[in-house]
Amino acid sequence: MTAARNRADLIAVSNAEYARLRKLIDPIPEAAALPRDAEGWSIRDIIAHRTHWLGLFFSWTAGGEAGEDVQTPAPGYKWNQLTAYNEAVRAASAGSDWAQVQSDMEAAHLRLMAWIEASSDERLYTCHLYPWMNDWPLGRWAEAAGASHYRSAAKAIRKMLRDRE
């Protein structure tokens, strides 16, 4: 899928992917959201994980705006250590209530959309605004944390549900 190249496209893809994800998870009761798959992940874990990454995006952006030394993906972790980091994120959310996880995801999505809507194309699609950024503009980072994560979550959840049948 081609990455969004402007604010309007980013809004559209973010809302569309979120709507698809919500349509999938809204009817899932807590009892079905908690069982783990062969890799040790539950539907609840997947949603909590995606919500966590939206929070990371906002921490990176806030740090960049404040002129701080932002460490991506997180302090003490390098990009080649994502498996360990994601396991730590999963473990931290292990006891979370399904309804609360869904509510947290909704709040994170609304925050993302408000941020995108308040941002200009220039802010979203100018590269190297902050030292922590690679060649991706902020809009691409927002898409990775939002729409792309929504899409991958839906794919993983559909697979989990199929595997249970």
Image (tube, rainbow, N blue to C red):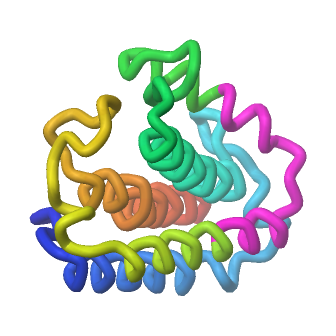
In the image, residue 89 lies in the stretch drawn in magenta: yes
On-image quarter of the C terminus: bottom right
Nearer the observer, 5 or 89? 5
41 vs 7, left or right, is right
* Residue in view at x 62 percent, y 48 percent: 52
Asked which quadrant contains residue 92, the reply is top right
Residue 134: x and y in percent read 21, 33
Q: Is residue 145 above or below residue 101?
A: above
125 vs 81, left or right, is left
Q: Is residue 36 above or below residue 84?
A: below
77 vs 155, left or right, is right
Nearer the observer, 23 or 39? 23
Nearer the observer, 51 or 31? 51
Nearer the observer, 98 or 28? 98
11 vs 40, left or right, is left
Q: Which residues are magenta?
A: 88-105
Residue 35: x and y in percent read 75, 51
Q: How many marks?
A: 0
Task: Kindly report the secondary structure that dominates the magenta region of the rendered protein.
Answer: helix
Residue 2: x and y in percent read 10, 65
